Image (cartoon, rainbow, N blue to C red):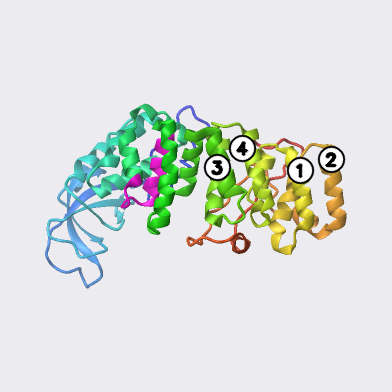
């Protein structure tokens, strides 16, 4: 997406639930020296069997218009059919180095041309792509999705009145939709849904139990559930995914991430209330390091006694929790925190020393999002201890936590 930077000090963060699967076509046009549509003009095999094929430029989207009708040689993944159209981006002015050719339909041509002249930024620009999410051409749908994945929640929220609630719900329930687009639809439903739509969360969750190939997009789903269902929904999330020791790791991870987004970006429920939800995870040592930085970031110093008591019960297996505990206490301004830290320094000097000498001390965000687990099959709490993740809480002297 081409950012509109005039008058802005920073660029808005992308949607926390949607991952762009590729650069947008607008990115291609912006970054490339040349962007063209070309046609395969021969029925011959690739030159030298190398995967390089002759193509004639039919449309110049960006660059010298005299390139039209030029014959070029480019790489294509599969042998093209005669007359097949391709999207090509060239880097370098005099002798462009062409990116691998992407096959496109004829309906994509006017779409690509429209991107060249697209104006505006933020929600105003994003609205243009809304209708293309329903397009019959997968190439166009994928690009429209990537535009939304690169957009901030604020930009998406500005389009709440433009969203087609019926289409959003139908897409959520469509078993052929991948988890990336389903996450986006949960994000849409958070903006255009009704309170009664909260029950969709349970229906879709059951659907995934019956069909293992149906991917819910759990973090976005839980966040939507909380947005539409409020306190009652949050209580369900606490019971089923945070306090429940038998909850699957991936579900608990998703719930933690959803609450983190609720507290940092959506703010439908107070951070004080959300912090109380995250405290439930402190009863599960293998997951506690995921939430202690958030509790510090939100200045939930009421959790201090529980966190310190947890430290005393931990083994070397939970060293990340010990590290997070030390950093939590160093950020807490209460005298009791300094006293607790001295007790831990006596009882486990190595853990305290390791945390204090860690390279994780740096100015910036008070908590770095924990990377998603690589185990797509799920893991119990016991198994979760072996899944790598990052718990970071910066130390920058005497300042307060960044509460962005």
- Using residue 50 as the reference point, say whether residue 207 is left or right of it: right
Residue at image mark 4: 274
Q: Quadrant of residue 303?
A: top right
Discs 1, 2 touching: Cβ within 8 Å: yes
**Quarter-wise, where is residue 52 in the image?**
bottom left
Quadrant in which residue 74 is drawn: bottom left
Confirm whether residue 191 shows in the render. Answer: yes
Secondary structure under tag 4 reads helix
Left or right of residue 352: residue 101: left
Nearer the camera: disc 3 or disc 1: 3
Is residue 29 in view?
A: no
Mark 3 vs 1: CB contact within 8 A: no
User: Label 2: which residue?
Assistant: 336
Residue neighbourhood size for the residue with mark 3, other residues' Cα within 10 Å, grouped as few (<14), some (14–19), many (≥20): some
Residue at 68 percent across and 49 percent down: it is 282
Where residue 16 sits: x, y (%)?
Answer: 49, 43
Which residue is disc 3 drawn over? 236
- Image location (x, y in percent) of residue 133: 30, 41
Q: Nearer the viewer, residue 59 or 184?
A: 184
Mark 3 or mark 4: whose residue is earlier in sequence: 3
Q: Earlier in the sequence, mark 2 or mark 4?
A: 4
Q: Would you name the residue on which mark 1 appears?
A: 304
């Amino acid at each position: 997406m081409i950012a509109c930077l005039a008058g802005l000090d920073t660029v808005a963060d992308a949607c926390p639930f949607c991952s762009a699967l590729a650069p947008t076509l607008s990115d291609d046009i912006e970054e490339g020296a040349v962007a063209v549509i070309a046609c395969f003009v021969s029925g011959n095999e690739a030159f030298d069997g190398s995967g390089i094929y002759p193509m004639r430029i039919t449309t110049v989207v960006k660059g010298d218009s005299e390139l039209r009708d030029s014959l070029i040689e480019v790489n294509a993944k599969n042998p093209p059919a005669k007359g097949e159209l391709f999207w090509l981006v060239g880097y370098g002015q005099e002798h462009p180095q062409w990116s691998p050719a992407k096959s496109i339909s004829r309906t994509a041509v006017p779409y690509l041309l429209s991107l060249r002249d697209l104006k505006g930024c933020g929600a105003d620009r994003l609205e243009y792509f809304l209708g293309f999410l329903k397009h019959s051409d997968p190439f166009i749908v994928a690009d429209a999705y990537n535009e939304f994945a690169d957009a901030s929640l604020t930009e998406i929220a500005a389009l709440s009145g433009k969203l087609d609630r019926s289409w959003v719900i139908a897409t959520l329930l469509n078993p052929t939709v991948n988890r990336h687009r389903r996450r986006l639809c949960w994000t849409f439903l958070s903006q255009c849904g009704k309170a009664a739509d909260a029950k969709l969360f349970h229906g879709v969750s059951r659907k995934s139990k019956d069909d293992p190939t149906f991917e819910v997009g759990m973090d976005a789903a839980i966040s939507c559930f909380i947005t539409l269902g409020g306190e009652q929904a949050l209580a369900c999330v606490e019971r089923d995914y945070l306090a429940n020791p038998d909850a699957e790791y991936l579900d608990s991870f998703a719930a933690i991430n959803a609450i983190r987004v609720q507290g940092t970006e959506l703010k439908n429920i107070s951070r004080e209330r959300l912090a109380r939800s995250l405290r439930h995870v402190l009863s599960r040592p293998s997951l506690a390091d995921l939430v202690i930085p958030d509790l510090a970031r939100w200045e939930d110093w009421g959790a201090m006694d529980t966190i310190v008591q947890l430290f005393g019960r931990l083994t070397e297996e939970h060293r990340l929790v010990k590290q997070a505990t030390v950093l939590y206490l160093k950020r807490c301004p209460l005298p009791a925190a300094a006293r607790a830290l001295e007790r831990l320094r006596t009882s486990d000097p190595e853990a305290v020393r390791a945390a204090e000498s860690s390279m994780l001390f740096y100015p910036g965000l008070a908590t770095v999002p924990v990377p998603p687990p690589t185990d797509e099959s799920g893991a119990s709490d016991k198994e979760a201890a072996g899944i790598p993740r990052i718990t970071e809480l910066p130390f920058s002297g005497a300042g307060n936590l960044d509460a962005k």
